Amino acid sequence: MSSYIERPRYLCSLGGALSTLEALPETIPILHSAIGCAGSIAWSQNGASGLQVGGYCGGLAVPSSNVGEREVVFGGGERLDEQIRTTLEIMEGRLFVVITGCVTEVIGDDVHASVREIRERERGVDIVSAATGGFRGNSYLGYDIVLSEIAKQYVKRDIPIQKGAVNVFGVTPYMDSFWRGNLIGVRRLLQLLGLTVNTFFTDEDSLDGLKYSAGAELDIVLSDVYGVETAEAYREVHGVPWITSTLPVGPTASSQLLRSVAEVLKPDVDVEAIIREESGRYYKCLEPLIDCYNDMDLQKYAVVLGDVNYAVSITRFLLDDLGWIPVLVQFTDVLTENQQERIAAKLDSADGRIRPKVVFDTNASEAIRYISELYPKRESDRYTESLSPAFVIGSSLDRALALKLGAPHLSVSFPVSNRAVINRGYTGFSGGLNLIEDLLSAAVAAR
């Protein structure tokens, strides 16, 4: 029987590319796609990312060729040329990126040739093209496609290496609803090592940071999957080496990231002293909570569902820092066997005694079946082991599962349509405290 994807937790590659461009400062996306693509992405993807819809040249204000029947029959090259010219006249930006939808790629429009002509005709205009037809893959792939093309076509080459400068990849805007806060947390964490940190997408970043990003000493990919293609493009085109790390949520993962980066870059700081100081602050903040945590029985069995970044980082945080027991971790991404093996290995506990059941299944509604296999109910048994007290950490789609289990629930991974997100983040030492606040608040509110 072939597998299927029920209620997928991502859009198409065009959606991921568009959201990535909307988050880049002074960047204007230009869609060469069918009517309705931008609107569908705005509400289905951005709206499901903590209600983050809109912005300058975002949401429903995205320039689009909106091709129809005429262009399908006769080609959409002229319509694209018209759309690019009017966008350059009307929209204020420094970088323009043309991305494609399924229809325009199927009919064979040569977007790269059109952009080359515009580039030759409009001297001084920075314009890039990327083939992002939705059939190529999901939103996470769109993030990598468009950033890889920018690395090849826009980022300056032969830039002198800046000592201590790093680029951060792997946090996908809007597909990670907490992207802004997470990137801010990562930057503050790495700045403890005295590094100059380029996160590309926050209010403290600029387009110049992207343009001259080839001068970085190291690229850091905070994912086992997302951002790897981009980092590889930087290595091939600009010679920038890269490493990967789990999204650093809480003191254990944050300490591991600091040590890993310090091992490569050899900064002139005492890394262990920094970790001791930051850990001291972290546990000092937790100290007043300990009595309630114990007396109110706030320890939980956890079910974690989500994408690669969150399923790994949240589970490790629960195991290493919070003292909860994850019993089931379900990855909802489409992953290769090699990726699955590598990711599953990260969820072994240090002593090997606690290991959650790990499944790779795009159909998240199957979670209740996996739980039933772990905790079978037999009427003939007088005493049965039950999943209680339980907690479900996933997306807003997993609220139904939590209701079936009678468990509290927190939406963290995409889609997050039952929370409003501005700059909340879970990375770093302080991000771990934020996550504890949200988890325990949900647990107490459900009583």
Image: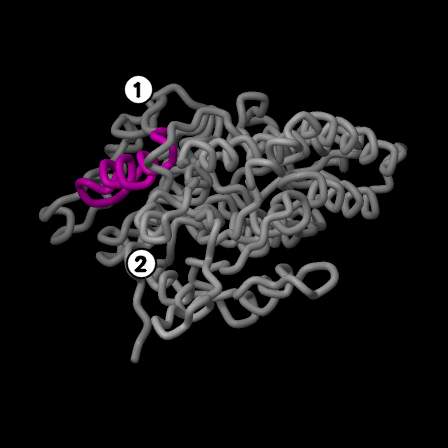
Amino acid type of the residue tagged 2 in the rendering: Phe
Give neighbour class at mark 1: few <14, some 14-19, many 20+ (Cα, 10 Å): few
Q: In the drawing, what numbered circle is on residue 155?
A: none
Crowding at mark 2 (Cα within 10 Å: few <14, some 14-19, many 20+) = some
The x and y percentages for residue 124 are 48, 27
Residue 87, by quadrant, is top left
Disc nearer the start of the sequence (2/1): 1
Q: Residue at x 60, y 28 (%)?
A: 184
Pick whichever, 139 or 447, lies toward us.
447
Q: Is residue 56 left or right of residue 351?
A: left
Residue 340 % position (x, y): 54, 67
User: Magenta stretch containing residue 41, yes or no?
Assistant: yes
Residue 168 in the image, given as x and y percentages of width and height: 62, 39
Q: Quarter of the image holding residue 410?
A: top left
For the C terminus, the image quarter is top left
Q: At which x and y percent is residue 65? A: 23, 37
- Do we see residue 14 in this rendering? no
Nearest the eye: 179 or 126: 179
Numbered-mark total: 2
Q: Give the magenta range.
A: 31-52
Residue 359 drawn in magenta: no
Mark 2 → mark 1, Cα distance in angstroms? 31 Å
Look at the numbered disc 1 and give the secondary structure of its residue. helix
Query: Closer to us: mark 2 or mark 1?
Result: 2
| 137 vs 286: above or below | below
Mark 1: amino acid: Ile
Residue visible at 56% across and 43% down? Answer: 151
Query: Is residue 231 visible in this depiction of the protein?
Result: yes
Q: Give the labeled residue for mark 1.
A: 90
Which residue is more in the foreground, 394 or 308? 394
Q: Residue at x 30, y 19 (%)?
A: 90
Q: Which residue is mark 2?
A: 135
